[in-house]
Image: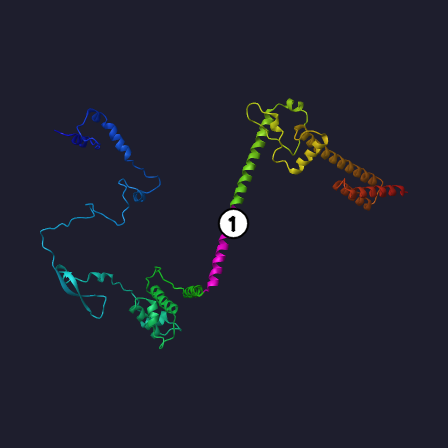
Amino acid sequence: MATGADVRDILELTGGDNDGPISKKDLINSDKKKSKKAAETLTFKRPEGMHREVYALLYSDKKDAPPLLPSDTTQGYRTVKAKLGCKKVRPWKWMPFTNPARRDGAIFHHWRRVAEEGKDYPFARFNKTVQVPVYSEQEYQMHLHDDGWTKAETDHLFDLCKRFDLRFIVVHDRYDHQQYRKRSVEDLKERYYSICGKLTKVRAPSGTEPKIYIFDAGHERRRKEQLEKLFNRTPEQVAEEEYLIQELRKIETRKKEREKKAQDLQKLIKAADTTTELRRAEKRVSKKKLPQKRETEKPAVPETAGIKFPDFKSAGVTLRSQRMKLPSSVGQKKIKAIEQILIEQGVDLNPIDLVLLYELKQAHSNCEYEQQMLRHRYEALLKAGSGGGCGTTGAGLVEAKEQIIDVVGAPLTPNSRKRRESASSSSSVKKVKKP
C-alpha cells in the first residue's frame, strides 16, 4: 500500500511535518501548494538594453556565482569523436629536397608522404623574381647615354638591381662607392626608372602608347627632408604645434557656428518676407472685395505708429483688463513718458485711453512740425519770386537759393532762424536802395 510520502512525490508536494497517511484535504489543496512553491522561486527578467551574456554574469536561475574559468562539458560539435577506419595509414618518409630559388645547390631534408616522392617542392611557386630589362650596346649609345653616368656604372647598377630584386636600400648598401661616384637612393632610382621608361618607349610597337613609370626624385628628396625635420623637432616645438592646432580647431568651430547663425538669420528673414507678402496680398484682396460706398463713408482715422496691442482672437468673453498691459515691444523711454503723464494727470497707471492720447499727441506734434516746415518753405519761395521780379542780380538769386536750402533743411534750429532774419533784413535794404 502506498504511503503519504509516495503520494506527495507523485503530486510534487513538499513534505510537511506529518508524513502520515494522506487525507482528502491534502488532495483538494494541492493546486494552492503548487502556486505557493512557484511564487517562492521568482525569476527576474533581463533589463532592456543589456546583453544576454552580461546578464548571465550578474544572475542565473540557480543563483550560482559566475564561473572563473571557461568550462565546456557538453557533448556536441566541439568535441567530435575521431572516426577510425579499417584502411591502412599512408606511409611517410624522411627524404631530401632542393629549393629552386637557391643557386648554390643546397640539399635539405624533411618528412614527406611516399606518394609525393619525386615531385617539386610545393613552396617553389612562391619564388617570384623581378624582370630587370637588358639593353644592348647599340641601344645604350643611341637612347640611354647620359653625361653623369658611365656605361660601366650603369651596368653595375642593373646588376645589383637584378641580384637584390629592386631592393634599393640593399642596392645602395652594396653599391661600390669607392670605384664610382657616391650616389643616393634617389639617384639610383631615378637612373633605373628613366632607362626602363626609355626602353619601353623604344621597344613599343608603332601605334600603341605604352605605360611608362616615372620616378620624381625631387619630390622624394623633399619628402625625406620634411620627415627629417619632423623627427628632429624639440619638445617645445611639438607643444607649440599642438597648441596651434587646437587654436585652429577652435577658429574653425567658431566659423562654422557663425555660418550656421547666418544661415538661420537668412531663413528667418525669408520667412518674414514671405509672411509680409502674404499679408499684403490678403489686404489687397480684402480691399477689392469691399464696396466703394463704405470706403467713402468711413471717417479718416489717423494712423498711430508705435504701440500696437495684440489682437485677441480667442473665442468667448475677454476681460478689458487683459488690454491694460503694454506689449513687450514698447521701449523703456516711452513707458516712462506715459507714467509721467499719468502722474501729472493723477490717473491710475496703464489706462488704454491715455496711451491713445499719448500717441495722438505725438502725431499732432509731427503734424505741427511739417506745417511749420511748409510755411517757411512757402515764405522763402515768395521772397525769391519777389526778388526775381524786381530784377535782382545773379548774386541775389544765389542768396535766395541758399536761404531756401537753409530754411528747408532745418526750419526750427536757431541758426536757421538767424539766417532767415539776416536774409529778410538784407532783402529789405535792397528794396530801399532801388532807383
In the displayed structure image, the side of residue 397 where residue 34 appears, left or right: left
Q: Is residue 135 visible?
A: no
Q: Is residue 415 visible?
A: yes
In the displayed structure image, the side of residue 270 where residue 396 appears, left or right: right
Q: Is residue 272 magenta?
A: no
Quarter occupied by residue 11:
top left
Q: Which amino acid, mark 1?
A: Arg
In the image, 418 versus 356, the foreground residue is: 356
Identity of the residue drawn at 78% across and 42% down: 414
User: What is the x, y in percent for residue 9?
Assistant: 18, 32
Q: Which residues are magenta?
A: 233-259
User: What is the x, y in percent for residue 50?
Assistant: 34, 42
Q: Main secondary structure of the magenta part?
A: helix
User: What is the x, y in percent for residue 166?
Assistant: 32, 66
Identity of the residue drawn at 70% across and 32% down: 343
Task: State the quadrant of the N terminus.
Answer: top left
Identity of the residue drawn at 60% across and 25% down: 319
Q: Is residue 258 magenta?
A: yes
In the image, 58 versus 143, the foreground residue is: 58
- How many labels were placed on the picture? 1
Quarter occupied by residue 357:
top right
Seen in the picture, residue 228 relative to 394 is either above or below; the reply is: below
Residue beneath label 1, please? 254
Quarter occupied by residue 353:
top right
Mark 1: few, some, or many residues within 10 Å (few <14, many ≥20)? few
In the displayed structure image, the side of residue 138 where residue 246 appears, left or right: right
Residue positioned most to the right: 435
At mark 1, the secondary structure is helix
In the image, 356 versus 370, the foreground residue is: 356
Seen in the picture, residue 251 relative to 133 is either above or below; the reply is: above
